[in-house]
Structure formats: structure tokens, C-alpha cells
Amino acid sequence: MSDVALVTGAGGGLGSIIAGALHAAGYRVAFADIDAAAAQTAAHGVDASGATAIGVGLDVRDYAAFEAVRDDLVHRWGSVEVLVNNAALQVATPVLDITPAEFAAVMETNVNGTFFGSQVFGRTFKANGYGRIINLASLAGQNGGTATGAHYAASKGAIVTLTKVFARDLAAFGVTVNAVAPGPLDLPSVRRLVPPEKLTPLIAAIPVQMLGDPAFVADVIVRLAARDAGFTSGATWDVNGGLFMR
């Protein structure tokens, strides 16, 4: 049987593209989202029968909810091998205007959600002797953020560090943990965040002079989820058009 993958934040946007790419690559996929109806609609779009794709409600801030979804997948399909921590809250508020509540909300979704998922599924993967965890970081977490809030940038920097910690601790058990850090992508969310008058100069500032292709980001994640991807772990894969170079 094919491997099973869970993608958080998959009710739309990049998450649904990632989940769809994994499904197209032969995985059985759970589209998870805080908006259960959106997740179910996205899953129905790739397999209306529900045999190889399902939509599930998941609030990544809820540790027990991760455990429940994991247990449901094991009951339904016999196992789970891949976790993609994609769910995120992005708010572009000037740093001096961010309230304590807003800062906490962004960190709770982005950092806690990634930690909770990685710990819950990491335990299962360790016990099974195999697993793949892929976290969505961001260029904002590497350059301090130029079009995003400080809380979002800080959360994505924390995800890069959590990726290394989990990768180190799970490496001996057949489990790899990697991150993908996209720059500005050609997504509705980016176009909502960046006003039209600022989009042209933003693109002009990207060395390759274009927004990124979300489908390519999804392809990178599919590759990192593969059975033969065991020699890459703890890495952050940059997809940013040359905006951040190492």
C-alpha cells in the first residue's frame, strides 16, 4: 500500500497544492484544516470517493487534536508516514503596533502547531522506524521579514530551529525532518498581503524578477517525503528567487 501523508492548513492556498501534489505522487493524503468544510472540499477535488484522500478538521493549537487525527489515520489506512506542517497565521502589522494578544496568536499557531505535530507524529515515526516531517518555514524567518509582521518572521525562524532539533533527535530512527523556506509566491494570499502598487517593485527586487511557483514548492516537498530521501535531514531548502543566498 502507498504511504499516508497528513498536510495541515490544506483547506486552500499552498497547503491544498502540497496535498494535491502528494496525492498525485501516489500518497494517500489527509487534507487537514481548522476549516473542516474547506478541507473536505479540497480532498473531494482529488478523490471524490474518499478512498485515497480525505478532509479532516484540525486546530493545530490543540495537542489532543493532533493525536486524534493520527489515531484516525492509523485506524483508517493502517499507518501514517509523512507529516507536512504547513498551517500558519500571517499578519502584516508594524512591529511597534503588534499587541501582546496578536503576537501570542501568531506564535501559538505557527510555532506551537509545528512543535505539537512534530512531537505527536515524531513519536509514532520513531516507534515505527520510519517517517518524514517537512515544515514550512519562510524567507521571512531568514531575513527578518520585509513584507510580513515581526511575529510571523520570528515564528518562521523558530520553525527552522525546531526542524534541526527534531532532525537531530530522530535521525537514528529512520526519520528525517526538513524545512522548506519559500520567498514570495504567486498565491492569492500574497496578492492580498501586498497592495497592487507595491507588487511591481516587490517583483523587481527579486533577482529572478518573478514570484515563485507554488507547484514547485510542492514538488520539493514531495521529493523530501520520498522513501529514498533519507540522506537529507535538518536542512532548510530555500525557494526564494535569489533573495536570500548562503
Image (cartoon, rainbow, N blue to C red):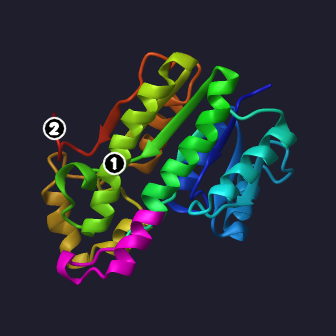
Q: Residue at x 20, y 75 (%)?
A: 95
The disc labelled 1 sits on which kind of residue? Pro
Residues in magenta?
A: 91-108
* Image position, residue 204 (x, y; %): 14, 58
The residue nearer to you, when weighing 46 against 6, is 6
Residue that mark 1 sits on = 182
Q: Secondary structure at mark 1?
A: strand
Choose the circle earlier in sequence order: 2 or 1: 1
| Residue 171 circle label | none
Badge count? 2
The alpha-carbon separation of the residues under discs 2 and 1 comes to 13 Å
Question: Is 93 in the magenta?
Answer: yes
Q: Residues within 10 Å of mark 1 (few under 14, many from 20)?
A: many
Residue 167 x/y as whole percent? 44, 29
In the image, taking residue 133 as reference, residue 53 lies left or right, namely: right
Name the residue tied to disc 2: 245
